[in-house]
Image (cartoon, rainbow, N blue to C red):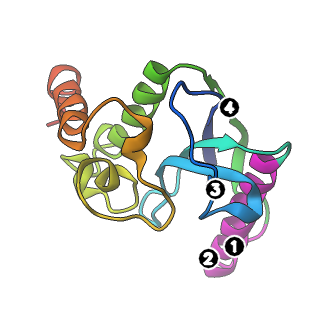
C-alpha cells in the first residue's frame, strides 16, 4: 500500500500590497497559490502548497479537490481501492514576509533534499522556475511582487542555503 503525507502552509498576511484581482488562476476555490511542489508518479509521497485563503473554507475545498482527484486517478491507474493520504494536511500559518520567504525556499528545495535532483530548477513539478527566471506559470501571478528580492537574489538565497546545509547531498 502507498501511504502519502500531504503538507500545506497558509499565508495569512503580508506587508506587501496585493492586487485587487488576487486568485485569478484559482478563483473558483477562493485561494491564491504562492508556491508549490507537486507529486510525480515516481515520488508520490507528498506535496507542498503555500496559499492564501481568501474566503472561509477556500483552502479546505481546494485541498479536498486535489486529494480526492489524485486519489481517484491513482486508484484507477493502479487498480486499487481505499485511502491514499495517510495524514490530514498540516497548516502552519505564515505571518511575516521573512516566514514567507523561508517557506517558499523550504518548498523549492524539497526535491533536492529528497535526492531527486541536484538543483531545484531541475524539478519541473514546482514553482521554482517562476521565482528565478522569466518562465510564466499558469498557477501563479508574478511572485516577485510579494518579495523584497529580485529573481537573481532569490536564486542566490536558495542556492547558498543548499550549499551551506545540504552539501552532503550535492
Q: Is residue 72 magenta?
A: yes
Which residues fall within the magenta stretch?
A: 58-81
Kindly tell me whether residue 87 is visible in this rendering.
yes
Residue tagged by mark 2? Answer: 78
Asked if disc 2 and disc 1 are in contact, CB closer than 8 Å, the reply is: yes
In this view, the residue in front, 119 or 29, is 29
Quarter holding residue 56: top right
Q: Residue at x 25, y 38 (%)?
A: 150
Residue tagged by mark 3? Answer: 23
Q: Earlier in the sequence, mark 4 or mark 3?
A: 3
Q: Earlier in the sequence, mark 4 or mark 1?
A: 1
Q: Earlier in the sequence, mark 4 or mark 2?
A: 2
Residue tagged by mark 1? Answer: 75
Q: Residue at x 17, y 40 (%)?
A: 152
Callout 3 secondary element: loop
Quarter holding residue 93: top right
**Is 115 above or below relative to 42?**
above
Q: Earlier in the sequence, mark 2 or mark 3?
A: 3
Q: Is residue 8 magenta?
A: no
Judge the density around disc 1: few (<14), some (14-19), many (≥20) Cα neighbours within 10 Å: some
On-image quarter of the C terminus: top left
Q: Earlier in the sequence, mark 1 or mark 3?
A: 3
Q: Is residue 112 left or right of residue 94?
A: left
Residue tagged by mark 4? Answer: 91
Residue 75 in the image: x percent, y percent? 69, 73
Residue 6 in the image: x percent, y percent? 62, 44
Judge the density around disc 3: few (<14), some (14-19), many (≥20) Cα neighbours within 10 Å: many
Looking at the rendered structure, which numbered label has been put on residue 147?
A: none
Residue 59 in the image: x percent, y percent? 75, 47
Callout 2 secondary element: loop
- How many numbered badges does the structure rendering display? 4
Amino acid at each position: 500500500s502507498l501511504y502519502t503525507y500531504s503538507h500545506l502552509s497558509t499565508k495569512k498576511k503580508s506587508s506587501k500590497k496585493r492586487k485587487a484581482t488576487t486568485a485569478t488562476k484559482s478563483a473558483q476555490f477562493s485561494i491564491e497559490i504562492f508556491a508549490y511542489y507537486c507529486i510525480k508518479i515516481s515520488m508520490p509521497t507528498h506535496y507542498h502548497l503555500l496559499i492564501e485563503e481568501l474566503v472561509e473554507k477556500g483552502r479546505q475545498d481546494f485541498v479536498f479537490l486535489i486529494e480526492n482527484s489524485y486519489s481517484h486517478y491513482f486508484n484507477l491507474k493502479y487498480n486499487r481501492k481505499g485511502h491514499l493520504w495517510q495524514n490530514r494536511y498540516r497548516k502552519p500559518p505564515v505571518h511575516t514576509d521573512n516566514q514567507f520567504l523561508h517557506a517558499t525556499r523550504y518548498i523549492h528545495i524539497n526535491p533536492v533534499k529528497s535526492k531527486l535532483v541536484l538543483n531545484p530548477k531541475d524539478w519541473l513539478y514546482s514553482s521554482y522556475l517562476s521565482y528565478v527566471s522569466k518562465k510564466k506559470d499558469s498557477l501563479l501571478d508574478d511572485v516577485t511582487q510579494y518579495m523584497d528580492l529580485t529573481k537573481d537574489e532569490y536564486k542566490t538565497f536558495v542556492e547558498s542555503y543548499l550549499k551551506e546545509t545540504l552539501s552532503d547531498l550535492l
